[in-house]
Amino acid sequence: AWVLGEAGEGCRGRCEARMTWRLLGVQVAAVRARRVAGGRGVMSGIGKQAVASGFCRVGPLGLDGDEQADPTVHGGLAKAVYAYPSEHAALWRQARLEAGVASLWEHDDETAGASASLVGENLALAGLLESQVWIGDRLRLPDCELVVTEPRFPCFKFNAAMGWNGAARQMARTGACGWYLSVARAGSLAAGQMAELVPGPRRVRLSEVFAAQVRRRVEL
């Protein structure tokens, strides 16, 4: 759905359409040693599960109960929350089947199930894709507001945690990366809420930043 909103600072007076979207799921995890493909273990917070109660508090450093194993690549003020489009579920399901990995948490029975995140996201969204999001856009929920800061780029543990060696390449090839958010207004959020994408300066599209990161890695 679309509603007409005010122009972003970089839009030179043009009106921007605000998008409405739904928050399908809210997931958190504590850092723990996780068994991955080949029986190896890594410390990771990727195995996020739906919060037990309806509402979850969100502050400057993220959601209550959520942890990150390596704060140099995840977490902090600029990467407090990780959002991901639920529309990519079919893509990852097919990729796992082709790789012979039946479930994302095949190597960790305790976190298997329908409530698990797709790729370690905190927020599962419906109705909002990477191509529709710009750096600086705001995700306005009823009781909090989050700001798009950058796309997620898989760290060196992503393949191991996902269970097959082509997982990072799959994310890079498809652009199904999701995005990190800072917290502009602390509060709470809950699965099922309707929310709004409020345009920011609209200078750089999220998908363009991710594509540039992929090209830079290839050149290296």
Image: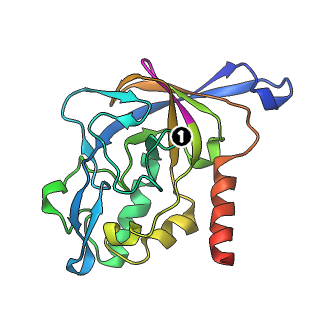
Density class for disc 1 (Cα within 10 Å; few <14, some 14-19, many ≥20) is: many
Q: Residue furthest bottom?
A: 38
Q: Residue at x 52, y 54 (%)?
A: 152
Instruction: Identify which residue, 214 or 33, lies in the foreground.
Output: 33
Image quadrant occupied by the N terminus: top right
Q: Where is residue 58 drawn, in percent x and y?
A: 37, 29
Q: Does the segment drawn in magenta span residue 50?
A: no
Location of residue 210 by image quarter = bottom right
Left or right, 88 with reference to 120: right
Q: Where is residue 201 drawn, in percent x and y?
A: 73, 32
In this picture, is 183 found above or below 4? Answer: below
Location of residue 158 by image quarter = bottom left
Instruction: Identify which residue, 137 or 175, lies in the foreground.
Output: 137
Image quadrant occupied by the C terminus: bottom right
Left or right, 59 with reference to 206: left
Q: Where is residue 112 drawn, in percent x and y?
A: 18, 57
In this picture, is 133 found above or below 93? Answer: above
Q: Residue at x 82, y 25 (%)?
A: 14
Name the residue type under label 1. Answer: Leu
Instruction: Identify which residue, 42 or 15, lies in the foreground.
Output: 42
In the rendered image, which residue does mark 1 sit on?
128
Location of residue 198 by image quarter = top right
Range covered by the magenta-colored residues: 141-147
Q: Residue at x 19, y 53 (%)?
A: 113
Left or right, 88 with reference to 42: right
Q: Residue at x 44, y 61 (%)?
A: 91
User: In what element is the residue under mark 1?
Assistant: loop
In this picture, is 18 found above or below 63? Answer: above
